[in-house]
Image: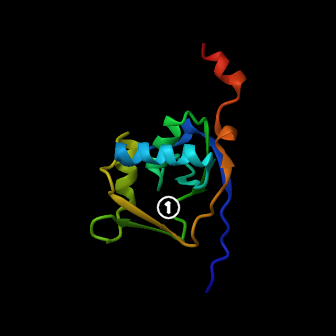
Amino acid sequence: MMSHHTYQITLKPISFFLPSEEVNTNDVQRLAAKIRGNGIWTTPLPVDGATGLVMDGNHRLRAAAMLNLAYLPCVLLNYQNPGLMVLDWQTGMPFDIEHIYRVVVHGKKVLPYKTTRHLFSPALPGTAISLDELRAPVLESAEAC
């Protein structure tokens, strides 16, 4: 049976997002350069809506910070979502979701690089938001001085 679940894309301030895994710095730099070159943000981050925990897209989150973006498009989900499957990146076996909460949300740490693999059914939507729209309005940045 086909799922008719539609995802809603929301803009959130970058401070909302909770990184969940280590990243490869070279990959982040490459990704940041690619995003800057495109001039648009194409992939919303799937996050746990209650905590801001990044399910997938830790490299994109770090690239966004490098590009001085203030907001990012995301899809707010939760781990009870029937179309979400979390697997161990190495073994392909189901991953203990409570472990993610213990380490990241309660322990304020990140999991090692490529610990989890999140699969979404149906697939997540794409976006085409100009990077300028994701940067902070000039007035806001003046307050920081």
Q: Which residue is drawn at 66% across and 17% down?
A: 142
x and y percentages locating residue 122 in the rendered image: 58, 72
> Above or below — where is 1 with respect to 100?
below
Q: Residue at x 44, y 48 (%)?
A: 58
> Above or below — where is 32 with respect to 4?
above
Going by the numbered disc 1, the residue's amino acid type is Tyr
Q: Residue at x 36, y 49 (%)?
A: 102
Give the farthest residue toward the bottom.
Answer: 1
x and y percentages locating residue 69 in the rendered image: 58, 36
Query: Left or right of 106: which side holds 7?
Result: right
Element type where label 1 sits in the image: loop
Residue placed most toward the observer, 129 or 19: 129
User: If the image is split into quadrants, where does the N terminus sit?
Assistant: bottom right
Where does label 1 land, which residue? 79
Residue 53, visible in the rendered structure? no
Residue 129, visible in the rendered structure? yes
Residue 137, located in which quarter of the rendered image?
A: top right
